[in-house]
Amino acid sequence: MGCSCSSVYFISQAEPTLTLTLSRKRERGLSIMSTEPIKFRMIKLPSSSFSNNANTSEEPATMPELTKNLLGDTGLNVTRLGFGAMEIRGAPRGREVTPEQADTILNAVLDAGINYIDTSIDYGMSEEYIGRFIANRRDEYFLASKCGCAVGAPVAPAGQPSQHVFTRENVVAGVEQSLSRMKTDYMDVVQFHSSPTMETLEAEGALDALRELKEQGKVRHIGMSGTLPNLAGHVNGGAFAVLQIPYSALERTHEDWIGAAASKGIGNVIRGGVAKGEPGESGVTGRVSWDTFESAKLGELLDDGETRTSFMLRYTVSHPGMHTTIVGTLNPDHLTQNIAAVERGPLPENVYEEAKKRLAAVGQVPESAS
Ligand SMILES: NC(=O)c1ccc[n+]([C@@H]2O[C@H](COP(=O)([O-])OP(=O)(O)OC[C@H]3O[C@@H](n4cnc5c(N)ncnc54)[C@H](OP(=O)(O)O)[C@@H]3O)[C@@H](O)[C@H]2O)c1
């Protein structure tokens, strides 16, 4: 039995199946006394198998210390800033991305200590790039993907929604494809994509299929990418350990629902936390209007030298019910800025309250969760 901080591995040479690849960081903590290639069978044991304490958290080892939150009751100790890997999907649904760009940003994310990566079957080259460039560092990150995306369907044209099919067969085919693409034998979180109703998930066995994949160890936690109106059923239905919810100062609709989910022990993954970045500064322009930022005069609340994107991100992480926000970027400088913003922490209470007051005055209000 080998122990790396909070993760425990069973290492056996009796039935060697894998050549052990060590990342640079892990090499420092483990000395190898052999010049021959060493083959191990490594099995990551769930925390429940080595702890009597159900609240024990787990996290990938040997990371720089970024701020972390427990992802609800999952026990996953996730960095408050995660990485949204949709940004590396490439054309035609996204901007052009070279393999070198994908390699650079994925490894920069891990080198910085970010430990939560979100992707999807639907995100073009994203899953394949994760498999190609960071599968060898699999123990450094929690991996979340989606299911229900139509496996084998042609890529939808840019601007049109991708097709989703919530049958048992399609869910299983999707999970198997994701595992193969990302060169892993488990995903930490798999979320139903596109916010289907509970009735849809139950009609053709989609939810049961994911539960069976969980029993097989291929999926560790079942999640939902949810939006209102169906989000109410997702929060209250008791089926999901993790919810992915869109939220920012410019999109406050789900603000109360994030709190409601957190109070039930659900892990909250926030997308849209920088509202695509300030227009003119983001590598992609013209997607989200920041007019509300101007009309609410949020610029007056910025600290000296603080960027609008940084303020936006700090507003997102000020929500007490959020656990991680999966910001996408192709730009290593933006990654550094985002880490710095999140590590500064939430906005001061008076600034946060003032921002909410100003946003409400221009019509940006949450939808009540009561
Ligand atoms: N479940 C779903 O239906 C769904 C839908 C959409 C997205 N998602 C997930 O959520 C993740 C986030 O996606 P999102 O749509 O919410 O996008 P986002 O993370 O809000 O925005 C990404 C954009 O912000 C820009 N950006 C990031 N940091 C910046 C900075 N410091 N300064 C200026 N611009 C900055 C990036 O451009 P640069 O490259 O130039 O930095 C990129 O164009 C996705 O990657 C995906 O994993 C899920």
Image: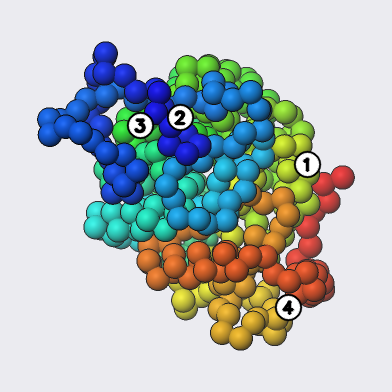
Q: Which colour scheme is used?
A: rainbow
Look at 58% across and 51% down and name the residue there.
Answer: 68
Residue that badge 1 annotates: 263
Q: Label 3 crowding class (10 Å Cα cut-off): few <14, some 14-19, many 20+?
A: some
- CA gap between label 1 and label 2 equals 30 Å
The label shown at residue 8 is 2
Numbered disc 4: secondary structure: loop
Residue 40 in percent (x, y) is at 27, 24
Mark 1 vs mark 2: give the one in front: 2
Element under label 2? strand
- Where residue 357 appears, as percent x and y from the top left, is 82, 72
Q: Of the two numbered discs 4 and 3 on the same chain, state the one appearing first in sequence.
A: 3
Q: Rounded to the nearest whole Å, what is the CA distance between mark 1 and mark 4?
A: 30 Å
Q: Residue at x 29, y 44 (%)?
A: 27
Q: Which numbered dot is residue 296?
A: 4
Residue 184 - label: 3
Return the disc, 3 or 2, that comes first in the chain's sequence: 2
Q: What residue type is labelled 1?
A: Ser
Query: CA gap, disc 3 to disc 2?
Result: 17 Å
Task: Say if disc 3 is inside 8 Å of ligand 1.
Answer: no
Camera-nearest residue between 145 and 117 = 117
Specify few, some or many for label 4: CA neighbours under 10 Å numbering under 14, 14-19, or 20 or more: many
The mark that comes first in sequence, 1 or 3, is 3
Decide which of tag 1 and tag 2 comes sooner along the chain.
2
